[in-house]
Structure formats: structure tokens, C-alpha cells
Image (tube, rainbow, N blue to C red):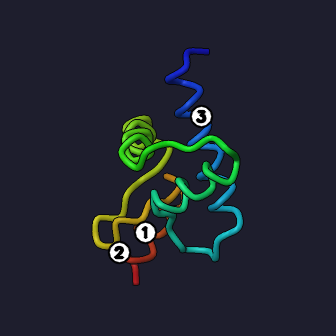
Amino acid sequence: MSPNRRRTQRVLRIFKDLAAKAEPGTGIWPGAINDALRAEDSPMGSWEVRFELSQLEAAGEVRCDPDSGAFFLATTARRAAKKRSSG
């Protein structure tokens, strides 16, 4: 696995860990990922995490809510959008 792919997978793993611990419907912000990476002694710059989130968004793994700037797992974002459009 390439170093770039490892970094993307690390950000996705952290993202999923944070999402699993968060209240349902709560998004994840890049700063929370930065904090978790620092706690693991694997810090990344804010721009690096944001780039990886863009990569994950392009791959269909996560979605950014344009109103809040928070990121959601793609499946969660689809469910939330359906609720908003039907309610």
C-alpha cells in the first residue's frame, strides 16, 4: 500500500471511530480528526486532513454538509438528506 493510501485509510479509520462514538446525526469536523491523530502520535497538518477528507468525499466514503461544514459517513449523509426532504 502506498504512503498516500495509508494516510487516507488512517484518516478514514479515525473518522469512523469518531462517528461511532458521536451522537447520531452529529458530524465530524477536521479538527477532531487532527486531535485524534495527535493523541496517536501521528499528527498531520490541518490542510493534510482536509485534503484526505476531500479524497474520501471523491471516493464516496464521506459527505460534507454545506450548511455546517461537518462531515458524515456517506450512508449517514444520505439518510439525513432523505429525512430533510421528506419532513
Q: Secondary structure at mark 3?
A: helix
Q: In terms of depth relative to the viewer, which is nearer, 28 or 75?
A: 28
Number of other residues with Cα within 10 Å of mark 3, as a class: few under 14, some 14 to 19, many 20 or more? some
> Which amino acid does the dot numbered 1 rest on?
Lys
C-beta proximity under 8 Å, tags 1 and 3: no
Left or right: where 67 falls relative to 17: left
Snapshot quadrant of residue 68 = bottom left
Residue at 47% x, 60% y is 31
Q: In terms of depth relative to the viewer, which is nearer, 64 or 51?
A: 51
Q: Is residue 38 visible?
A: yes
CA separation, marks 1 and 3?
Answer: 28 Å
Residue at 64% x, 60% y is 18
Q: Secondary structure at mark 2?
A: helix
Which part of the image, by quadrant, shows the N terminus?
top right
> Which amino acid does the dot numbered 3 rest on?
Gln
Residue at 41% x, 40% y is 48
Which part of the image, by quadrant, shows the C terminus?
bottom left
CA separation, marks 1 and 2?
Answer: 5 Å
Identify whether 5 is placed above or below 9: above
Identify whether 87 is placed above or below 15: below
CA separation, marks 3 and 2?
Answer: 32 Å
In the image as oriented, which residue stretches furthest toward the bottom?
87
Q: Which residue is mark 1?
A: 82
Identify whether 15 is placed above or below 85: above
On residue 85, the disc is 2
Q: In terms of depth relative to the viewer, which is nearer, 61 or 8?
A: 8
Q: Which residue is mark 3?
A: 9
Q: Is residue 78 visible?
A: no
C-beta proximity under 8 Å, tags 1 and 2: yes
Task: Where is residue 55? Give x, y as percent.
Answer: 40, 36
Residue at 28% x, 65% y is 66
Which numbered disc, 1 or 3, marks the residue that appears first in the sequence? 3
